Every structure is written in C-alpha cells, then in structure tokens.
C-alpha cells in the first residue's frame, strides 16, 4: 500500500469523534510539549571542559566593526566627516518602500539565544530592541522565553526610552503593556523583523569567531555601546552622518528622517501605481516571487526571479494575499511541519510583498500557454 492510500484510510477511521490522523497529531504535540517541559526542568549539566576564550579582544581599544574602522583611526581628524564605502552588491528593489515608522518611539524587538559554554543543556537569552528610525539598540538579558520574562524586559525598555509602538513576530502577539501598540507578523514570506534581524547579524559579526563571547553580557554590552556611537549611512542629513545615539537623543533629527522617508515612500507608491500593482481584481493571475528564507526551504537554491503563479485574493496592509497555483508540498519537504499551522502551508492563501508581484492574466483560463507549460 502506498503512502497516499494509507493516509486516506487513516482519515476514514474514526474513534471517539476523531480520525486516526488527528489522534496521531495530538499525540505528537503532547509528546513535544512534555519533552520541552522535561528539558526545562532538568538541571543544567556542567561541561567536562569549560571552553576558554579563543581570542581576548580588547573591545574598548579595538573597533569591532570592520567596515567603519577607518572612522576611528588616529590618522583621521575626528571632526572630519567620513563616509565609508560599501562594496557589497545589494539587490535592486526599485519598488520597495523604505522600512521606517511614521511615529516617534517605534521599536522592533526579537529574542535570540546562545548556548552556555559552561552547561550543555542551558541557553542564554537576550531581548534585542532597536528604534526603527534612530537605529538605537537596547539589549536585555532574560532568564528564559516565558511571558513574564519578556514583559519584565519590555518594562525596562519603557523605563529607559519613550516607546509608542512595538513590532515583532508572533512570539509577542499575546503580550499587552499599557497603551503601547504591539504589532505581530507571523507571515514567513513578508518583510518583517528586517531592522532587528540585521542588527543581530551585525553584533554577531562584531563579536568575532568565538561565538561563546556572545554569552558574555559585559562584552556584548560594550559592543552595543560602540554600535550606538558609530555613524550610520541611513542617518545622513544634509550630507552629515549621525550616530544612533545622536538621533535617539534629538527628536527633531528623528522627525527629519521620518519626513524624508515619507517623501520617498510617496514617490515609490506612485511608481507602484503606475506599474498597475493596485489594480488587481479577485481571480486575476499574478507572477510572484517567493522568498523561502523564512520557510523550511531555507537552504534551497533560489534566485531573485518570478518563480510561481498565484491567484489574487485581496490586499492586506499594502501586501498581496494570493493562492499559489501548483504549490510546493512543504509538508513532505519538512518532517517537522505542523499540519495544523498555516505558517508554512503554501496550499492555503499566503501574504507576500506587493513589489514581488506582476499582473499576468485576468483569470486562470486565459494564462498564456508558455507560462502554463513552464509553471503548471
């Protein structure tokens, strides 16, 4: 008997109001929850050999960010404005709006962890919070990922800075703190957590090859202080490059950056309208690009091209909700896929950025033959 026939038979057999497939899925979830509880309650075991520091970097006298080390060179006048060149080739997304917040005090937050060098089954957790507009970074060490620990760290953030909005992934969806608006986005194919994810990679690179240094909060805090005092190209006003600390302490500068990004956003919105990105009707067929970087297909080779066809459903907060034609079966690609979740299920409607779409035909029946043969 093949797998499909077996699964069909399992769905037909009903015991106490549930199919065998549903009973098995409930068993898997219960087993995973029990295992996680046992893992948390278990006392940390000391490592046999405590890993020593690979390199003892003096973070106070050595600048960790290689791309801007010349700015702190003794040969350069400190009053001179230095704009470090960037030789990396970045993807040209002409129709992508700037990633900013129109309100002061808007932060993007995320939780990361690192393995403790002293204990095998213990992790060190940090909450990263970065201001959308000023790029000022706060890092708080938390004991675990429980709701109470997250709220305590967020209260520390509120006590140190003005906070009006928080944006994160689905991990913060059920948290409420006063009148602060908390926006959560668990859609894997949309552009979210962009600022905080990028700064996490920056801080990791600055720590160096010894990733156990990441568990040393004192060293990590020194790097964060250096980061906040380093000029950022995105904080350029009238050809002067400001630091996150300068913009964070001056709301007028942050307001100038917000208005500048608003003008850019309005221009790009007009270009999107000229390209016909706001004229989609339900049932229209679109060429779309799927970014698999946040899905179980993370390591699959991909290019910045249109790689699927989809039927338009509706607009969702400036993004496009659509249903893919002939989707990839991620359930078979990933053994850990949760069939009860819609997060990675491409067989259900998904939400993607509007600039990753292009009109193809008014209906499925009128798809040009060359596209039908290639995609379907």
Image (cartoon, helix red, strand yellow):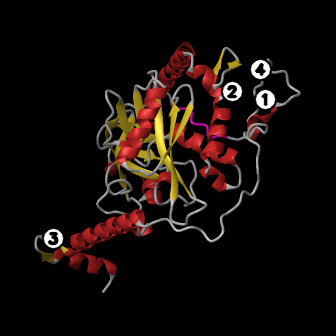
Q: CA distance from mark 1 to mark 2?
A: 9 Å
Decide whether residue 153 is among the magenta residues: no
Give the quarter of the figure containing the C terminus: bottom left
Q: Nearer the viewer, residue 98 or 61?
A: 61
In the picture of the structure, the residue carrying the numbered disc 2 is 231
Label whose residue precedes the other's in the sequence (2 or 3): 3
Residue 361 in view here: no
**Going 57% across and 36% down the picture, which residue do you hit?**
93
Label whose residue precedes the other's in the sequence (4 or 2): 4
In the picture of the structure, the residue carrying the numbered disc 1 is 71
Q: Position of residue 199 (x, y in %)?
A: 59, 40
Q: CA distance from mark 2 to mark 3?
A: 60 Å
Decide whether residue 94 is among the magenta residues: yes
The part of the chain drawn in magenta is 90-97
User: Tags 2 and 3 in contact by the CB under 8 Å rule?
Assistant: no
User: Tags 1 and 2 in contact by the CB under 8 Å rule?
Assistant: yes
Q: CA distance from mark 4 to mark 2?
A: 9 Å
SS category of the residue bearing label 3: strand
* Image-quadrant location for residue 18: bottom left
Q: Is residue 305 left or right of residue 281?
A: right
Q: CA distance from mark 4 to mark 1?
A: 8 Å
């Amino acid at each position: 008997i093949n797998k499909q026939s077996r699964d069909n038979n399992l769905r037909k057999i009903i015991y106490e109001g549930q199919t065998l497939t549903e009973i098995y899925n409930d068993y898997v979830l219960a087993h995973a929850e029990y295992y996680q509880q046992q893992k948390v309650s278990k006392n940390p075991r000391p490592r046999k050999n405590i890993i020593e520091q690979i390199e003892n970097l003096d973070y106070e006298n050595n600048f960790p960010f290689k791309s801007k080390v010349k700015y702190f060179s003794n040969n350069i006048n400190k009053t001179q404005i230095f704009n470090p060149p960037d030789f990396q080739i970045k993807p040209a997304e002409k129709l992508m709006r700037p990633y900013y917040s129109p309100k002061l005090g808007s932060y993007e937050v995320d939780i990361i962890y690192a393995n403790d060098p002293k204990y095998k089954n213990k992790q060190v957790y940090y909450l990263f919070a970065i201001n959308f507009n000023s790029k000022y970074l706060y890092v708080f060490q938390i004991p675990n990922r429980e709701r109470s620990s997250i709220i305590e760290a967020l209260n520390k953030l509120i006590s140190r800075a003005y906070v009006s909005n928080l944006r994160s992934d689905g991990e913060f969806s059920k948290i409420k703190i006063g009148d602060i608006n908390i926006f959560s986005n668990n859609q894997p194919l949309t552009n979210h957590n962009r600022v905080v994810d990028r700064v996490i990679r920056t801080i990791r690179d600055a720590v160096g090859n010894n990733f156990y240094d990441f568990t040393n909060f004192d060293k990590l805090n020194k790097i964060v202080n250096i980061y906040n005092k380093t000029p950022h190209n995105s904080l350029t006003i009238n050809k002067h490059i400001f630091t996150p600390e300068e913009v964070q302490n001056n709301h007028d500068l942050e307001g100038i950056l917000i208005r500048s990004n608003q003008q850019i956003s309005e221009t790009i919105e007009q270009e999107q309208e000229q390209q016909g990105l706001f004229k989609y009707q339900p049932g229209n067929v679109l060429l779309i690009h799927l970014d698999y970087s946040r899905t179980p297909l993370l390591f699959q080779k991909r290019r910045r091209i249109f790689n699927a066809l989809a039927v338009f459903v509706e607009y969702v907060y400036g993004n496009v909700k659509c249903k893919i034609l002939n989707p990839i079966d991620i359930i078979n690609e990933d053994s850990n896929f949760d069939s009860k979740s819609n997060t990675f299920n491409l067989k259900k409607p998904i939400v993607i950025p509007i600039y990753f779409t292009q009109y193809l035909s008014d209906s499925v029946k009128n798809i040009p033959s060359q596209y039908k043969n290639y995609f379907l």
